[in-house]
Image (spheres, grey):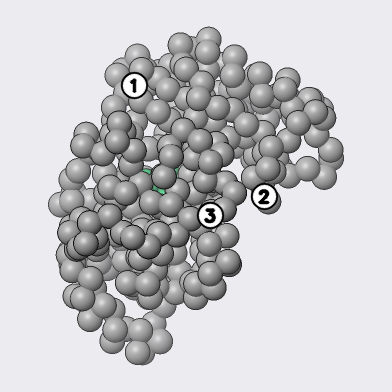
């Protein structure tokens, strides 16, 4: 395992493999790796000849009042973890390496979803994500890239960007990895107090209850939504949004669901000061 900090050195390192036609897999992360990231790394190691895990806390996807400064940082431990799963390189550039001219003048943004769901509460977030992911694709020239379904809207936007802009890379979806309690793994779970961590189980519990109700025949969008909202509120959480949307275009459903509807429930909620996201597909 080698930690690479410069763009040029990553390119030089990967070039011989790419000349030989080897498959390069990229796993973009912001670090503080856990088993959720681990699932992405394992998928890449299985599919690809070379796996590069990027660890870059991307400042341009954080709002001014967000948690950029307190976000956990532990590059050595991340590199050891990635190596233990078979990754070949950790690419950990500095902010100056990625943005030598300060905030980029040229950015990638979507035209419709950046202001919905997470985007509504995190202005500029998704264009920061799409821009850094584009840069990582162009820098690594990876053939495959791995993203978690935990960040459902992000994954959807990246898949669309790859199609819309003809990036020559295959995007792989990895299902959400949860703790045994049901809590979706996240680097931000470290902010939760012991009590908040217990209370936060209301998110996955509410999502599962809504799915059970759906499987038992409930088709009312507001009824299904209310199940999740109630679960969170009863557990002292503060709901930011719970939306029932179409898996294929992320447009909101309302009224009564049809049998052919492909449903995913997207949630963001605060427990204490910690914002958590989660989701569940019904079918
Ligand atoms: P992050 O470091 O939070 O930016 O996440 C990097 C990648 O790991 C993203 O594609 C996330 O969706 C994915 N990821 C984070 N947590 C999980 C999880 N619990 N299960 C699956 N993928 C995850």
Q: Quadrant of the C terminus?
A: top right
Percent x, y of residue 91: 24, 63
Across and down, in percent, residue 256 comes to: 82, 30
Some atom of ligand 1 lies within 8 Å of the CB belonging to the residue at label 3: no
> Which residue is label 3 attached to?
110
Q: Label 1's element?
A: loop
Return the x and y of residue 166 as percentages of the image width and height: 54, 73
Question: In the rendered view, would you say 179 is above or below 43?
Answer: above
Q: Secondary structure at mark 3?
A: loop
Report whether the residue tagged 2 is closer than 8 Å to ligand 1. Answer: no
Give the residue drawn at x 52%, y 46%: 114
Mark 2 vs mark 3: in front: 3
Question: For mark 1, what is the residue?
Answer: 273
Q: Is residue 253 left or right of residue 250?
A: right
Q: Nearer the viewer, residue 43 or 251?
A: 251
* Marks 2 and 1 close (CB-CB < 8 Å): no
Of pointers 1 and 3, the one earlier in the residue sequence: 3
Q: Is residue 67 visible?
A: yes
Task: Determine whether, in the image, residue 259 is placed left or right of residue 275.
Answer: right
Using the image, tell me which numbered label, if any, was put on residue 249: 2
Which residue is outermost to the bottom?
Answer: 20
User: Quadrant location of residue 245?
Assistant: top right
Q: Residue at x 36, y 17 (%)?
A: 272
Q: Is residue 207 above or below residue 193?
A: below
In the image, what residue occupies the spot 73% across and 20% down?
223
Residue 135: percent from the left, percent from the top?
35, 65
Q: Nearer the viewer, residue 207 or 30?
A: 30
Would you say residue 45 is visible in this rendering? no
Picture residue at 53% right of the left edge, 62% below the top: 161
Q: CA distance from mark 2 to mark 1?
A: 31 Å
Give the SS element for disc 2. loop
């Amino acid at each position: 395992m080698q930690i690479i900090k410069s763009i040029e050195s990553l390119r030089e390192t990967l070039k011989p493999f790419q000349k030989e036609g080897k498959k390069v897999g990229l796993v973009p992360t912001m670090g503080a790796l856990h088993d959720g990231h681990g699932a992405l790394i394992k998928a890449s190691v299985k599919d690809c000849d070379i796996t590069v895990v990027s660890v870059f806390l991307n400042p341009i996807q954080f709002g001014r009042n967000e948690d950029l400064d307190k976000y956990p940082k532990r590059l050595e431990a991340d590199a050891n973890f990635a190596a233990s799963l078979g990754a070949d390189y950790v690419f950990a550039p500095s902010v100056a390496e990625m943005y030598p001219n300060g905030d980029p003048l040229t950015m990638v943004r979507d035209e419709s979803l950046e202001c919905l769901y997470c985007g509504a509460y995190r202005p500029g977030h998704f264009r920061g994500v799409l821009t850094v992911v584009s840069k990582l694709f162009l820098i690594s020239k990876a053939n495959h890239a791995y993203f978690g379904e935990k960040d459902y809207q992000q994954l959807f936007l990246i898949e669309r960007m790859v199609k819309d802009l003809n990036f020559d890379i295959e995007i792989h979806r990895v299902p959400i990895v949860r703790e045994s309690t049901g809590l979706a793994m996240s680097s931000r779970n470290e902010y939760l107090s012991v009590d908040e961590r217990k209370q936060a189980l209301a998110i996955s519990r509410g999502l599962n209850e809504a799915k059970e109700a759906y499987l038992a025949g409930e088709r009312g969008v507001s009824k299904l939504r209310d199940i999740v909202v109630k679960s969170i509120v009863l557990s002292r959480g503060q709901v930011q949004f719970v939306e029932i949307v179409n898996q294929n275009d992320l447009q909101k459903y309302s009224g009564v669901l049809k049998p052919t509807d492909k449903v995913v429930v997207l949630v963001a909620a605060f427990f204490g000061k910690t914002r958590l996201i989660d989701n569940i597909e019904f079918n």
